[in-house]
């Protein structure tokens, strides 16, 4: 049996031997039991990387976004989100966990004003933004960044270069009918430099860049507008481990600056390490908002499959009694 | 797998090689056409030289070529705007026809004493509106319901052509035409003036080229159209009003085609006929595509095609060979150029067997 | 009335050939807008061979080969060289129109040889031809028409009842899945585009041999586009195509028949109906999302395995 994955934990758990591929070349084949995760990572990335995700708990939090009883219907008329309520504060990363298609996409798009909210309210600084288009939201002076799941198909225009992808978020604020590229060229240069984006130039179509660099372009654009809320949906999907940690660092940096970050993720280890709180979705409903310091991965797994925190607590107590 | 041919996407191909491949395709197609003519028992050298003579041999013939390049260029520009948005406007033929209808509607109803400038302006406005309406109908359905525009616009062509045929044979038949199914000739004040011996349409064409170029590359709406053409999701993400953009782009596209109808009715036919679009709407799709949606390149390609059309018309008279030869040659050139795109985008090489093991 | 319906059938047969041809092509996921061109190629080659050999079998063969030949150019460009389907199809129409005009020019006004016309002459099918009402409409036609019936029936059985037909559907619906399941996608596309072209060629030949047995340049006269419309109108179903073709064929002669009856309706308004009807169908089918009236999912998309 051959399994191809970028999740090293899976490799460690189920494989007997492991071959590391990098840039189309086979680097090394090892017996899994003889190798440590950190060694593997080094082979995958090609250099030593710092593998710790730092988490600074910052006390001075203020509420910035509040979702109140939000329901969103999918095209077939079923509930994609059902009575979702939560608050989001500055200086925090709120993780969102759940089985794929549990309403994560709709959650992000509802906040960004991209889909119709059928019921409920979303407050941004006490202002209800439900029913407003993205342009109206911008006009209210609400700065929001959104890294959608589909980077090339939604967040960026694959065939356009970095400059024209930067313009995407900028042009609507330009006066008149003429498209001004000048300011965006400067911005593109700055983002390439600040995020260390590997590209032949700012006029290279973004689809020709590597996944990590594509994501940096997108993230760079979104944080350049100094957002107060940053929504990220699976921002490290498909990226190699080095690029992933770079993204985590960038998100942490934003959090320190006071940005309220939503991180939709699939790797529970990362969610536990990175996030201040984790909200778990199941079939569009919130099954729990938990502090990763106080629960286990198994608990989150149970929440993801529709159990409530009370059930889990009760089960635990029962287990203790049985002992 | 046993397939010995390996196809890979080219990373980069220099501009020079790209042009070289295209030129090679054109040369090959001409050789191929020559061989076909030889099999038919015709002298290809004589035919080709006659085509060149026919389109550029005398001043008059050059003018004729330009007259044919005008509708082709403006219609291509209209199509470029739609194609930029990835909207398959196959309806240029109908939009041209309706533009001509709009111009004629004015021409047949203004008193002959109206000043030329006024009539022409009215005709122009009416032509643009009619062409734009014909494009608006499929556009609004696409924008609101997601209706497939390829088939819709294609069908709209024939609705327009049959409608004008109906007028030509019915309500608009020239009472002084002796029962011959035709619409009355335009009066003097409805005819576009000539500049340097060619109808003023060529100036329109140049203006349109510049305007469309600026529109696509240097306006916010032009940028929006390009983004919508690449991905609806991205456009939605950026907060664009996709429906509005589709409608605007198609109004421009149809308006440009309507202008073509006006020029053809007023300056070329000097009346309305059902065949007023004369296939230009279809040829323009191909020229637009070949120009890679670049308005400047498009001019050169359209002039080349106009030369072929004009040359074909000439050999009919000069050699008695069917003008259809030029359609055949056109078709062959297109086939080869369409095929050559593949070699520009992909590299074809033989697989090395040893690499198969891994 | 029966006479009128019988002439609707005659008017519908060329549409039936071309519609079933285009339908099969589209089922493989390729939209070929070269129907008009392929019909003209079939029409001119059928006529030429018929005129020069007086052999009805060669006539049919020539039409088949001409239509398939046009389709081969299209298939090579779109399937092997991945050229844009719409542009290639339109080019094929330009090419086919020129081809027919050019080859046919010396024959303008010439008639189909008598023995070929005789071969295809109207014959009543025993038993079936004697059924009241139905018989005179459907079964007292020329032999070419019976060929169309047989072709249509075979196409229906082929598409719905055979393994290959089901695979064909898979190719058009989801090309990459079909490829992954081991279907030879390229071969399927080639074969069905060629079959489609051959049928369009037959439709053209019906026009130049039976319908108007004197060569004229505009013999096809836009029927190729009606066929493209019909494919949508009949929702990619060969059985429905049979009735759709007769309906649209009927519309194309309606005005003239009414004029004979003394009613003054312009034929050109009737000529608009097929196109308008198709537009309405296109609008409703996208709106209703009814599964079986939808075009094949991958229609119009070229397939590149590497970009899967």
Image (tube, coloured by chain):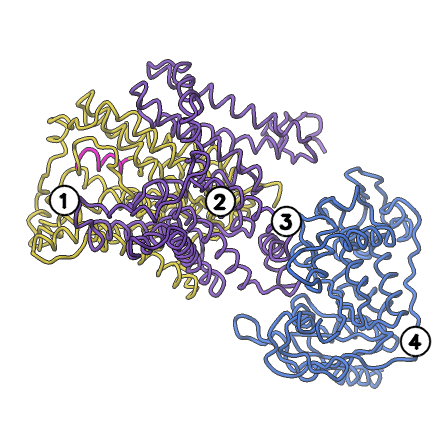
Chain colours: A blue, B purple, C yellow
Q: Nearer the viewer, residue A229 or B227?
A: B227
Do marks 4 and 3 share a chain?
A: no
Q: Whole-percent x and y of residue B77? A: 51, 45
Left or right: residue C163 compared with residue A288: left
Main secondary structure of the magenta stretch:
helix
Which of the 4 image quadrants contains residue C280?
bottom left
**Residues rendered magenta in the picture:** C202-210
| Subunit that carries the residue with mark 1 | B
Question: Going from the N terminus, do you reach mark 3 or mark 1 first?
Answer: 1
Callout 2–callout 4 Cβ contact below 8 Å = no
| Subunit that carries the residue with mark 2 | B
Q: In 3D space, how far apart are the residues under numbered discs 4 and 3 (Cα atoms)?
A: 47 Å
In the picture of the structure, the residue carrying the numbered disc 1 is: B178
In the picture of the structure, the residue carrying the numbered disc 2 is: B204
Q: Nearer the viewer, mark 2 or mark 4?
A: 2
Classed neighbour count for the residue bearing mark 1: other residues with Cα under 10 Å, few (<14), some (14–19), many (≥20): few
Looking at the rendered structure, the secondary structure element under dot 2 is helix
In the picture of the structure, the residue carrying the numbered disc 4 is: A58
Looking at the rendered structure, the secondary structure element under dot 1 is loop
Q: Residue at x 38, y 39 (%)?
A: C34
Q: Is residue C205 magenta?
A: yes
Q: Whole-percent x and y of residue C173? A: 47, 51
Tag of residue A107: none
Looking at the rendered structure, the secondary structure element under dot 3 is helix
Q: Whole-percent x and y of residue B293? A: 56, 43
Callout 2–callout 1 Cβ contact below 8 Å = no
Classed neighbour count for the residue bearing mark 3: other residues with Cα under 10 Å, few (<14), some (14–19), many (≥20): some
Q: In 3D space, how far apart are the residues under numbered discs 1 and 4 (Cα atoms)?
A: 94 Å
Q: In 3D space, how far apart are the residues under numbered discs 2 and 3 (Cα atoms)?
A: 20 Å
Q: Nearer the viewer, mark 1 or mark 4?
A: 1
């Amino acid at each position: 049996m051959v399994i191809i994955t970028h999740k090293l934990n899976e490799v460690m758990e189920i494989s007997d031997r492991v071959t590391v591929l990098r840039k189309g070349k086979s680097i090394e084949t090892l017996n899994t039991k003889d190798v440590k995760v950190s060694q593997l990572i080094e082979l995958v990335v090609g250099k030593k990387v710092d593998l710790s995700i730092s988490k600074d708990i910052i006390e001075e939090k203020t509420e910035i976004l509040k979702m109140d009883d939000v329901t969103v219907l999918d095209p077939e008329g079923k509930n994609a989100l059902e009575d979702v309520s939560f608050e989001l504060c500055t200086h925090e990363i709120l993780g969102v966990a759940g089985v794929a298609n549990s309403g994560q996409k709709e959650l992000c798009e509802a906040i960004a004003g991209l889909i119709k909210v059928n019921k409920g309210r979303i407050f941004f600084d006490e202002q209800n933004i439900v029913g407003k288009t993205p342009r109206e939201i911008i006009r209210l002076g609400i700065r929001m960044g959104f890294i959608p799941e589909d980077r090339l198909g939604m967040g960026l225009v694959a065939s356009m270069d970095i400059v024209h992808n930067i313009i995407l978020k900028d042009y609507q604020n330009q006066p008149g009918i003429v498209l001004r590229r000048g300011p965006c060229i400067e911005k593109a240069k700055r983002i390439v430099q600040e995020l260390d984006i590997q590209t032949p130039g700012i006029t290279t179509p973004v689809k020709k860049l590597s996944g990590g660099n594509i994501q940096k372009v997108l993230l760079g654009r979104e944080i350049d507008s100094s957002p107060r809320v940053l929504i990220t949906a699976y921002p490290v999907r498909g990226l190699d481990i080095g690029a992933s940690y770079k993204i985590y660092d960038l998100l942490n940096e934003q959090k320190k600056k006071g940005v309220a970050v939503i991180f939709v993720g699939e790797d529970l280890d990362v969610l536990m390490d990175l996030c201040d709180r984790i909200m778990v979705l199941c079939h569009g409903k919130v099954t729990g908002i938990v502090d990763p310091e106080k629960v286990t991965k198994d608990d989150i797994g149970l929440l993801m499959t529709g159990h409530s925190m009370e059930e889990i607590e009760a089960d635990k107590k029962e287990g203790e009694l049985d002992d | 797998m046993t397939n010995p041919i390996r196809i890979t996407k080219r990373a980069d191909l220099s501009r020079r090689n790209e042009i070289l491949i295209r030129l090679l395709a054109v040369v090959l197609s001409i050789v191929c056409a020559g061989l076909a003519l030889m099999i038919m028992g015709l002298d290809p050298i004589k035919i080709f030289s006659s085509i060149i003579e026919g389109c550029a041999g005398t001043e008059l013939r050059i003018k004729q070529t330009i007259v044919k390049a005008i509708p082709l260029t403006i219609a291509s520009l209209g199509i470029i705007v739609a194609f930029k948005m990835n909207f398959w406007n196959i309806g240029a033929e109908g939009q041209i026809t309706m533009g001509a209808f709009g111009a004629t509607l004015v021409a047949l109803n203004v008193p002959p004493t109206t000043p030329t400038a006024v009539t022409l302006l009215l005709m122009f406005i009416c032509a643009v509106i009619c062409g734009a309406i014909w494009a608006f109908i499929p556009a609004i359905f696409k924008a609101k319901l997601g209706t497939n525009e390829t088939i819709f616009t294609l069908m709209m062509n024939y609705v327009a052509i049959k409608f004008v045929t109906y007028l030509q044979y019915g309500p608009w038949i020239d009472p002084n035409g002796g029962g011959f199914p035709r619409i009355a000739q335009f009066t003097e004040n409805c005819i576009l003036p000539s500049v340097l011996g060619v109808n003023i349409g060529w100036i329109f064409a140049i203006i349109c080229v510049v305007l469309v170029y600026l529109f696509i590359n240097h306006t916010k709406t032009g940028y929006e159209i390009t983004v919508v053409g690449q991905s609806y999701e991205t456009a939605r993400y950026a907060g664009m009003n996709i429906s509005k953009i589709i409608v605007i782009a198609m109004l421009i596209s149809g308006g440009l085609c309507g202008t073509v109808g006006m020029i053809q009715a007023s300056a070329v036919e000097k009346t309305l006929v059902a065949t007023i679009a004369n296939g230009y709407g279809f040829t323009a799709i191909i020229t637009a595509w070949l120009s890679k949606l670049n308005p400047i390149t498009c001019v050169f390609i359209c002039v080349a095609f106009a030369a072929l059309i004009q040359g074909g018309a000439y050999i009919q008279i000069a050699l008695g060979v069917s003008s259809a030869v030029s359609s055949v040659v056109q078709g062959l050139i297109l086939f080869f150029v369409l095929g050559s795109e593949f070699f520009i985008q992909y590299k074809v090489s033989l697989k090395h067997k040893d690499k198969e093991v891994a | 009335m029966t006479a009128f319906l019988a002439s609707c059938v005659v008017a519908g047969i060329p549409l039936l050939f071309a519609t079933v041809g285009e339908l099969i092509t589209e089922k493989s996921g390729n939209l070929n807008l070269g129907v008009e061109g392929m019909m003209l190629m079939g029409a001119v080659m059928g006529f030429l061979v018929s005129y020069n050999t007086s052999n009805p079998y060669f006539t049919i063969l020539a039409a088949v080969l001409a239509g398939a030949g046009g389709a081969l150019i299209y298939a090579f460009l779109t399937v092997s060289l991945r050229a844009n389907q719409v542009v290639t199809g339109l080019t094929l129409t330009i090419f086919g129109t020129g081809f027919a005009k050019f080859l046919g020019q010396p024959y303008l006004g010439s008639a189909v040889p008598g023995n070929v016309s005789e071969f295809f002459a109207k014959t009543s099918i025993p038993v079936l031809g004697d059924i009241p009402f139905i018989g005179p409409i459907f079964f007292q036609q020329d032999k070419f028409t019976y060929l169309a019936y047989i072709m249509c029936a075979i196409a229906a059985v082929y598409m719905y009842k055979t393994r290959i037909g089901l695979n064909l559907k898979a190719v058009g619906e989801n090309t990459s899945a079909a490829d992954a399941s081991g279907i030879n996608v390229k071969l399927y596309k080639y074969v069905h585009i060629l079959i489609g072209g051959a049928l369009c060629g037959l439709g053209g030949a019906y026009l130049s041999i039976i319908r108007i047995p004197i060569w004229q340049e505009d013999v096809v006269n836009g029927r190729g586009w009606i066929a493209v419309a019909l494919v949508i109108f009949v929702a990619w179903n060969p059985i429905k195509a049979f009735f759709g073709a007769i309906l649209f064929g009927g519309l194309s002669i309606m005005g003239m028949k009414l004029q004979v009856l003394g009613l003054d309706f312009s034929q050109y308004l009737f000529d608009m109906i097929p196109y308008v009807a198709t537009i309405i169908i296109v609008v409703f089918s996208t709106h209703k999302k009814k599964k079986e009236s939808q075009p094949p999912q991958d229609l119009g998309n070229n397939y590149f395995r590497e970009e899967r």
